[in-house]
Amino acid sequence: DCKGKIAIVGSGLIGQSWATIFAGSGYSVTIYDIDSEQVTRALANTKLTLERYEQDGCLRGKLSAHQQSNLICGSNNLKSCLQNALYVQECVPESIEMKKEVFTQLDEYCEEKTIMASSSSCINSSQFTEDLKHRSNMLIAHPVNPPYFLPLVEIIPAPWTDPEITAQTRSLLEEVGQSPITLNKEVPGFALNRIQYAVINECWSLLQSGVLSAADIDKVMYEGLGRRYAFIGPLETMHLNADGIVDYCKRYAEGAYNVSATFTPPPIKYDIPTAELVEKELRQITPTDKANERKQWRDSQFAALDKLKRGS
Ligand code: NAD
């Protein structure tokens, strides 16, 4: 009584994450990669990952890790990977040429109704789907790493994407436990990276002008803004910090405007000399040989926060 077939094309870090997410909801998942040994590695990795999640009490869904990994299989043939798939999640490296090549193949092998979504972090799909027959079935579904614990997915339709396909993508992603948002039009960097770059730009500027150390800049986020934004966004923060957002603007817009007028104009290029100074400082917190340990710690903290948020 499996729910239907999902095809994952490209089985690196992100392809493997998507496989665990879809299997968690009982979908049958077929993984394809241009490198057949990578398919074998991906199947072994997803099995181990699901077992670890089960041990750590953060496995999604009602099925056991064993049942979930049995839902994931590999294929060395793109055509058979796509056969009867209701949804394809493309996860090949970030290059327009590669996306173009893969979507041209998807266009050839897909069924009439197959939804084809790209995980691309910053390439809009109109840059690689324009000339394809099934372009109305194609769009971007950009996850955030690690997708199992940071559930936001940015859905960005091209101008020719069928709105019904966009809506179906959103409901499928909601059903499997992600938190999708939909951009009404294509824009460089989508939403997350536009906002992220605005933050980094100001961090860079504060560094360059010597206002704070790198470690203290990061602390502003993880002890202040980041904690707040893990639960309510910037607009609701304004709303709750006064008697509504209109009242907030009446009281604080002037001050915010005056501060904003002191910002250095974008775009700031993240220059290597400044990066080298920051790196020196950050290496004291996380030496090169401890980076993997630190990443594992980060992911376990994300898992704990995800548990808290899903329970609340
Ligand atoms: P990755 O390098 O880990 O994996 C890419 C995989 O694609 C490799 O296994 C490679 O063999 C395979 N591949 C290459 N050409 C192929 C082809 N023609 N057909 C099938 N498979 C092919 O990359 P990743 O980090 O998983 O990123 C994949 C996509 O997801 C990129 O577009 C990236 O921008 C996006 N993304 C990455 C992150 C992240 O943090 N890594 C976050 C969000 C989105």
Image (cartoon, rainbow, N blue to C red):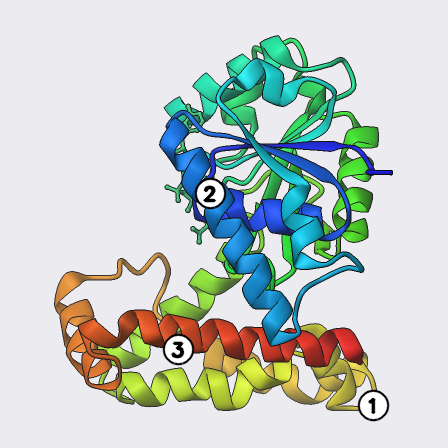
Q: Position of residue 218 (x, y in %)?
A: 38, 82
User: Disc 1 versus disc 3: distance between alpha carbons?
Assistant: 28 Å
Instruction: Decide if residue 108 is in sight here.
Output: yes
The quarter holding residue 303 reads: bottom right
> Mark 2 or 1 closer to N-term?
2
Report the residue at 83% width, 38% height from top: 3
Give the labeled residue for mark 1: 243
Side of 48 where 183 appears, left or right: right
The amino acid pointed to by label 2 is Ala
Ligand 1 closer than 8 Å to label 1 CB: no
The quarter holding residue 135 reads: top right
Give the labeled residue for mark 3: 262
The amino acid pointed to by label 1 is Asp
Q: Position of residue 104 (x, y in %)?
A: 52, 14
Do the residues bearing badges 1 and 3 touch, measured as CB atoms within 8 Å? no
Report the residue at 65% width, 87% height from top: 252
Give the labeled residue for mark 2: 42
